[in-house]
């Protein structure tokens, strides 16, 4: 069966990427999002998909029926039982399936009871992936060799060195990248250094002899050459395809906002396989 899909809150197309990666038979009939910057990025990567720029709250039943879709991605929550859907809820993290990133998210799969679903559902929220897990790959596999100076941490950020989460080439983990990455320091995502963990530990030990945030403290941390992950690297961690493009007109902060609001493609890919098994 060839599916006809409506992609709501389409953003930069994470769901679209996952559908293609899953190898399922079907087409994205329409993608809807109110964010014009996200829509430009989406259009760059999926130029043949019909796009609608509007708030989905203004989307009518008549408009959806005209599209004649049988699958909706990123559907808002509604009364599944009352609407005769079987469903399964999940709480999953990319690190559970071999991706070196913490991004715990809620997912819900739902199918009309009139359709056959091979998956054996449970009443409770499942926190273990219902598919094969793989070993975590090291960050060195996705790091760019040459990075512009703009991505290196400035003095204003280094003064908050105490709260930075630092990753290395051999790290098999990273913190969740949010839409505030590079705008706020604490809790928005990891930073990277080519230096060794031992060198970083020694450098912090010496920096902590000074007042946190002082000129001396900052100068010592400069030795670490700390930098942000580039948008291309974050996309790789979010498992977007290598050929995925962010247009040059998109600013660094816009890129981080868009990616931070997106999904981990690999997790969605595997869940789509479960939904249509």
Image (cartoon, rainbow, N blue to C red):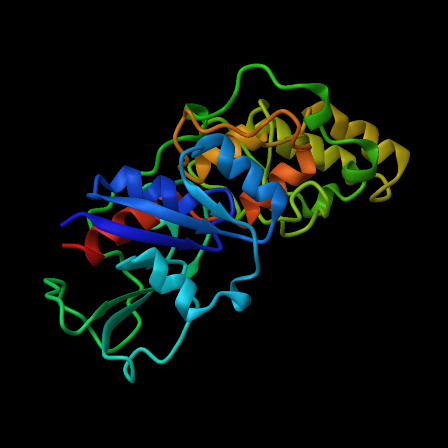
Quick check: 54 left or right of 94?
Answer: right
Residue shown at 44% from the left, 49% from the top: 31
Q: Nearer the viewer, residue 70 or 84?
A: 70
Task: Point out the image quarter for the C terminus.
Answer: bottom left
Decide: is 169 above or below 129: above
The extreme top residue here reads 146
Q: Is residue 97 left or right of residue 37?
A: left
**260 relative position to 29: left or right:** right
Measured as percent of width and height from the top left, residue 216 is found at: 87, 32
Q: Position of residue 257 (x, y in %)?
A: 62, 45
Quarter holding residue 203: top right
- The answer to whether residue 225 is seen in the rendering is yes
> What residue appears at the point 31 percent right and 64 percent down from the top-left corner?
127
Residue 171 shows in the view: no
Q: Where's residue 138, x and y in %?
A: 40, 30
Farthest bottom residue in view? 82
In which quarter of the view is residue 61 placed? bottom left
Q: Residue at 45% across / 32% down in the picture?
A: 47
Count of marks, rendered view: 0
Residue 190 or residue 210, whichever sits in front: 190
Residue 75 appears at what percent x and percent y? 40, 63
């Amino acid at each position: 069966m060839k599916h006809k899909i409506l992609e709501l809150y389409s953003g930069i197309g994470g769901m679209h990427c996952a559908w293609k990666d899953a190898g399922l038979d079907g087409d994205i009939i329409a993608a809807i999002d109110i964010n014009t910057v996200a829509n430009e990025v989406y259009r760059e990567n999926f130029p043949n998909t019909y796009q609608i720029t509007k708030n989905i709250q203004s989307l009518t039943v008549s408009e959806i029926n005209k599209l004649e879709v049988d699958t909706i991605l990123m559907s808002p929550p509604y009364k599944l039982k009352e609407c005769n859907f079987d469903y399964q809820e999940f709480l999953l993290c990319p690190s559970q399936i071999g991706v070196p990133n913490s991004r715990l998210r809620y997912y819900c799969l739902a199918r009309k009871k009139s359709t056959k679903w091979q998956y054996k559902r449970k009443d409770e929220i499942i926190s273990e992936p219902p598919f094969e897990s793989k070993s975590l790959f090291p960050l060195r596999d996705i790091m760019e060799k040459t990075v512009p100076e703009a991505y290196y941490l400035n003095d204003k950020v280094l003064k908050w060195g105490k709260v930075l989460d630092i990753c290395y080439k051999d790290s098999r983990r990273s913190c969740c990248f949010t839409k505030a990455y590079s705008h706020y320091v604490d809790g928005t995502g990891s930073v990277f250094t080519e230096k060794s963990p031992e060198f970083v530990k020694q450098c912090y030990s010496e920096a902590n002899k000074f007042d946190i945030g002082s000129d001396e403290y900052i100068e010592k941390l400069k030795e670490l050459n700390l930098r942000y992950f580039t948008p291309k690297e974050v996309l790789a961690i979010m498992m977007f395809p290598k050929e995925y493009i962010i247009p040059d007109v998109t600013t660094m902060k816009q890129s981080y906002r868009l990616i931070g609001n997106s999904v981990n493609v690999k997790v969605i890919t595997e869940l789509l396989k479960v939904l249509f098994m």
